[in-house]
Image (tube, helix red, strand yellow):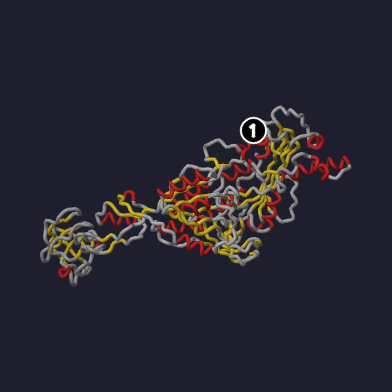
Amino acid sequence: MRKEFRDLMDPEAAAQVVRGLDIEGGTETVSLTEARGRILAERVDAAIDVPGFDRASVDGYAVRAKDTFGAGEADPATLELAGTVHAGEEPAVTVDPETAVEISTGAVLPPGADAVVMVERTATEDGEVAIRTAVAPGDGIMVAGADVSAGERALGPGTRLTPREIALLSALGVEDVPVRTGPTVGIVSTGDELVRPGAELDSDSGQIFDVNSYTITTSVEEAGGDAVLYPHVGDDFDALESQLKQAAQECDLVLSSGSTSAGAVDVIYRIIEEQGELLCHGVGVKPGKPMLIGELGGAAYVGLPGYPVSALMTFRKFVAPVIQDAAGEPDIGATTVDGEMAVTERYREGRLRLMPVGVVEDGDGNTLVYPVDKGSGATTSLADADGIVEVPPDVEQLDAGDPVSVELFSEDIRPPTLLGMGEDDPLLSRLLDRLDRPRYLPLGSREGVRRLREGIADVAVTAGPTDRDVETVELGNWRREWGLVVPRGNPANVSGVADLVDSDLRFVNRHRQSGLRQSFEDSLEGIAESRGVAVTELFEGIDGFDLTTRGSESPPRRVLAGKADVALGLRTTATKLDLGFVSLGNQQVRVLAAPDRASKPGVEELEALLPPADELVADLDGFEI
């Protein structure tokens, strides 16, 4: 049986369906020491006056105001000093006509007094007080209930308890408060290919670490829900059914990820149809098309897609607001920033698109927005992004310069101080560690230059012979040794690039944007020219030439695992992995800045680290400053 997506539900209609699910939070009573950040469940009325007595608001003398009328600097009123009242004690003296009582801030106003003259406007001598200013009744006094009056509504339900509110509750003598609890949300991650972090991973069998269990759990908690993570289950119908039914019995809302699309092994929709009610199967949104909405065993149910980007963005768009509402979290709205597209982005699928984007400031402080999308299966699409831009179904293209509004993933997000793109390099990673809030995307030398030309990146890092048709400012450079990484001992006796062409060796290349790849192809060009053949013939003659990977360690690790005989790489990587190395020369790594970004603080901070300090290079074999 294979379920097809025939009629995708409109995103707003799907959101209404999720909002209509029966998802309720609860209440609990906590002490004030545990109340910070919680949401008050009930109104709190003041049971006492605050303060509970008339008290002095300044240091000075408690008096009868009418005894000071007409007093001034030239003609002070002289009153007899009758005693003293300190804070925290019951007055043992009365203010009679023509007398004054010394009083401390916060002390109880003694009987007979109706004002306090601050000490700075008085003078004492021989048991008398000279009052050099007139005061009116109530001056220098906080009367009982002036802060909060008994019976007054102090705090209302839905109030987030910050230190300010907790101070008020403390002043009212409240020891415990009723607060909202979020709905209990069960999380079931499915798929035979998933392995929980900490367990052994079998990549040869297509296993991957379970990302969604942890990201959805933390997302639920961030939204105010009480997350319950259930053991991972595969795609077996009976096991899935048992796990989902248990979660439905124990939770207000059940979230699953994976097994929701129209594949042959995707069975969750069958379980919901048979054991509950399936209200939606498929939504017109990208990413997130294969979302399920329904009810199961008295609990609300939402099935999220399996790819991490799809799952997280679908959760954020449709589920998080409902959990937040059930938890009593105040609706403060999304944090947004306005900017303009840095590049043109095309999209013609006719669905609402939730486009992950990054935010960067140009040299003039203007906000630029650029797409960050490696596909639904790439977790780093979100790790490298700051928020999303919603692209309506009828918008086929966003042009460079078009105004857009970015919904940030968090109100705490700030643009990176430095946005770099280009070559993956171990020394560069160490330099970035010394910067404040940088972001670096290892897209390869060519792509880094292209993004610099487009006005997205602040800096591009290139290695080897990269064509540059863009004006740049070079901040610094270093050299690194590159070549062929082979098994320890070099059992195939590889001596150079020609051996890859002439011998039956399994090779792992770098991606096309890489500076290492360009240097390698230049070496092949030289061999092709000497042999009088087209270089494409040499490309075709290398087993694995088109097998490309990103990152400086990925190709050598295939050699380490016995999946390849030779890989393109760096000497320092071979040394780190205890592999053999055949040197092909040295590359110059350049750090290039866009001229209009050279004065950005983050760029200047990076430039100040160049040339790199000796200790950063000491253990990087094959690197030279």
Question: Which residue: 28% across, 56% down?
Answer: 169
Q: Nearer the viewer, residue 161 or 111?
A: 161
Residue 204's spot in the image, x, y percent?
Answer: 63, 37
- The answer to whether residue 332 is above or below residue 555 is below
Q: Amino acid at mark 1?
A: Leu
- The answer to whether residue 624 is above or below residue 271 is above
Horizontal side of 81 relative to 466 (left or right) equals left
Q: How many marks?
A: 1
Question: Which residue: 81% across, 37% down?
Answer: 501
Q: Does the rendering let one see residue 257?
A: yes
Residue 125's spot in the image, x, y percent?
Answer: 16, 59
Q: Nearer the viewer, residue 344 or 87?
A: 344
Dot 1 falls on a residue whose secondary structure is loop
Which residue of the protein is positioned furthest toward the right in this rendering? 532
Q: Nearer the viewer, residue 581 or 222?
A: 222
Residue 127's spot in the image, x, y percent?
Answer: 13, 58
Return the residue at label 1: 577
For label 1, the crowd category at 10 Å Cα-Cα, with few meaning under 14, some 14 to 19 and many 20 or more, is: some
Quarter containing the C terminus: top right
Horizontal side of 550 relative to 86 (left or right) equals right
Question: Which residue: 61% across, 43% down?
Answer: 429
Horizontal side of 336 relative to 165 (left or right) equals right
